[in-house]
Image: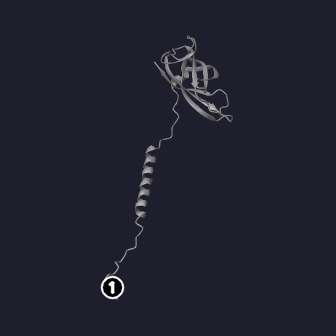
Amino acid sequence: MGGLIQPSPTTPQDDSNWRPITLGVVLVVAIVGVIAFLTRSAPKSAAPPDPYAASLQLSDLKMSAAENFVGASVTYLDGSIANTGDKTVTHAMVRLGFKDSVGQITQTEDLPVRMLQTTGPYPDTVDLSVAPLGPGQSKPFRLTLEHVSDSWNREYPELKITSVTVK
């Protein structure tokens, strides 16, 4: 016989905590997928060198190293640049490729060509926009590297003029 108070029928809990957790995981995966899709980039193709770059010739390369005022080593690549074309060059970029002992590129640097002026008490570099390189002219230049990879094989790097601005 039953009493006046009967226990209410209980429904077994169906682990209601799993539903929000699953929804959260699905939402995070969807957001990460959308971000990955939107930020992916097309494979970078190597841009062809500037056509006027063929009119610029680098020669008489010499490398040296020195310590700067904080004790770090700085590497210099000095040389001569000649303009065999018919336009005045106001800016040029050079890509340097440093190789390791097995001939693989370990470091690449893109640097602006800076003219080396020795008219003052010490050599100084100036941008090509300040000292443009006219047609038929040849001038000394300097590339300054703050850091070179430790695995560099100590041979001259590959040099390639990548962009040129003329007027």
Tell me if 114 is positioned left or right of 6 in this view.
Answer: right
The residue drawn where x is 59% and y is 20% is: 58
Q: Quadrant of the N terminus?
A: bottom left
Measured as percent of width and height from the top left, residue 47 is found at 51, 32
Position of the C terminus, as image quadrant, is top left
* Residue that appears at 43% across and 60% down: 21
Q: How is the image coloured?
A: one colour
Residue lying at the far bottom in this picture: please name it. Answer: 1
Rendered position, 16 above or below 90:
below
Pointer 1 local density, CA inside 10 Å: few below 14, some 14–19, many at least 20:
few
Return the x and y of residue 145 as percentages of the image width and height: 58, 26
Left or right of 162 in this view: 28? left
Residue corresponding to mark 1: 3
Quarter holding residue 158: top right
Q: Position of residue 22 (x, y in %)?
A: 43, 60
Where does residue 125 sit, x and y in percent of width and height? 54, 18
Image point 46% across, 47% down: which residue?
A: 36
Q: Nearer the viewer, residue 79 or 135?
A: 79
Q: Is residue 145 above or below residue 116?
A: below
Q: Looking at this view, is 132 or 166 the one in front?
A: 132
Q: Is residue 47 left or right of residue 151?
A: left
Identify the residue at the far left of this view: 4
Image-quadrant location for residue 148: top right
